[in-house]
Amino acid sequence: MAEPNTVPPAAVHSDALVFFGATGDLAYKKIFPALQAMIKRGSLDVPVIGVAKAGWNLDQLKARAQDSLEKHGGVDAEAWKKLSSLLRYVDGDYSDKATFVEVRKQLGGAQHPAHYLAIPPSLFETVIEQLVNSGSARGARMIVEKPFGHDLASAKELNRILLSAFPESSIFRIDHYLAKGPVHNMVSFRFSNAFLEPLWHRDYIESMQITMSENFGVQGRGSFYDQTGAIRDVVQNHIFQVMCNIAMECPARRDSEAVRDEKVKVLRAIPPIESCNLLRGQFEGYQSEKGVAAGSTVETFAALQLEIKSWRWDGVPFYIRAGKNLPATCTEVVAKLRKPPQTYMTDPAPGNYMRFRISPEMTIALAVSVSKQDENGLRSLVELEACRHPEPDEMEAYERVLTDAMAGDATLFARQDYVEEAWRIVDPVLKANTAVYPYAPQTWGPAGAPEPLQKNVTPPGGWHPISDDTDSYHVVPPDTSR
Ligand code: BG6
């Protein structure tokens, strides 16, 4: 089905947005609010064509869009008026040629449309083929949503389908985590502060911890989640992206390829995760969720250890844990530094650490050891913490990714080689069918897993406690392992 594609030069702005899955959940929760925000900021002034098979007309789509805005941040009268004038709607089956004839008609004179597939990956091939055959793929950009496959083989197949019609430079694979300000900020913090670099490697760092915990369950997404599980849902994509930001070398240039090259280099240095370094858990009650199979062995919690065999990181264990129905909603990275030598002071010094909180608020904290005069001069760790709440007009992740994709800036999107490397790391362990241990809702994962496994997936000294405290100065609870 491949036909020569006229690639839009990176600087050319897409002159129309076509989004498939216009009546779906993602459009309702994220896309309409993002489109309104883009209009308010002045970055969207092209036709927006929704496509779906719902038996709807344009007025019904507009009503849905308005309802979406009311529920997600509110309607801005002026921006809504504009969005409403830009909206078009095509109702039809994705396998029906007539649907795409109509899309082409609605595109009018647009030369470089952006097609956004907010639909299940099983429909990608059909839609792409129809876009090619109807002449709507030429000169266009393609925006796709995660999951990018289910394992390494399916990810390769998905890439084959995408690349049969679009060059890699025109494909934008969304991982919305990358578009979060604090995730972005970790990179600028690392590469714009000279004091950090001398510490940021195996000589000073003892271990890295990354936690992505959510205090809610599967929120009605049982049938999706039961095909997915925590590793595929967030570890292989969101958490790996965060890990690459903390582990990569400074890109040689600011362009998207230089940044993405460095990320891929991190993944290439990671051997596949071994079964003895992965603990999978499932919260009690998960199997009663709608859409979840009885006897399901899908994990809602994963804790694992991996290593990055690079000059900078060899020998530093990276610990990752993620799960649903845990005690807090928080994403945080903790870099634990090695302990200083015990010479001048008589009590053992606690090791310093740096903490980056990505959500709910952005925090950067440095834990330093101080003497407490009131406690016989014994030392304890105190966090020096900088915390920032989002500005009212800060870009939400979906506004950011749609704006960047339409402008042709690929920095925040996953490249083909990155996606395949990420799957390579988890693929064997996903297929190993390791045991799944139950855990009580609102606890930090399975307490009953075998001791050697627990030890392999727990940082020395334990996980850094996730606190709700966002004061700018507080004392850290003592580390009992020392
Ligand atoms: C999604 C996952 O990609 O990311 C969800 O499918 C998860 O399970 C969500 O809850 C977390 O993202 P955010 O931006 O809501 O923290």
Image (tube, helix red, strand yellow):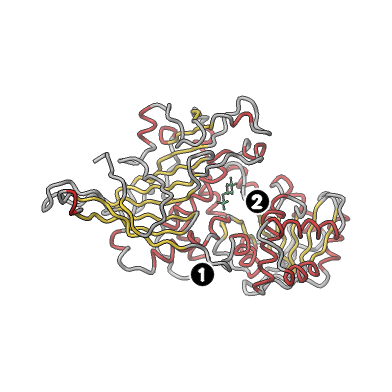
Q: Is residue 355 left or right of residue 37?
A: left
- Reply above or below: 273 against 373: above
In the rendered image, residue 273, in percent from the top left (x then y), is placed at 44, 39
In the rendered image, residue 372, in percent from the top left (x then y), is placed at 20, 53
Residue at 67% across / 71% down in the picture? 40
Between 333 and 66, the one nearer to me in the picture: 66
> Does mark 1 have its CB less than 8 Å from ligand 1?
no
Amino acid tagged 2: Arg
As drawn, the residue found furthest toward the top would be: 295
As drawn, the residue found furthest toward the front would be: 374
Residue at 61% across / 29% down in the picture? 287
Location of the C terminus by quadrant is top left
- Reply above or below: 176 against 449: below
- Reply above or below: 461 against 358: above
In the rendered image, residue 360, in percent from the top left (x then y), is placed at 50, 54
Amino acid tagged 1: Asp
Task: Tell me if mark 1 has few (under 14), some (14-19) or many (20+) residues whose alpha carbon lies within 10 angstroms of its own.
Answer: few
Q: Which mark is residue 255?
A: 1
Circle 1: element type: loop
In the rendered image, residue 328, in percent from the top left (x then y), is placed at 48, 44
Dividing the picture into quadrants, the one containing residue 135 is bottom right
Closest to the camera, between mark 2 and mark 1, is: 1
Which mark is first along the chain, 1 or 2? 2
Q: Is residue 223 left or right of residue 464?
A: right
Residue at 38% across / 32% down in the picture? 454
- Please give the residue where the numbered disc 2 appears in the rendered image: 160
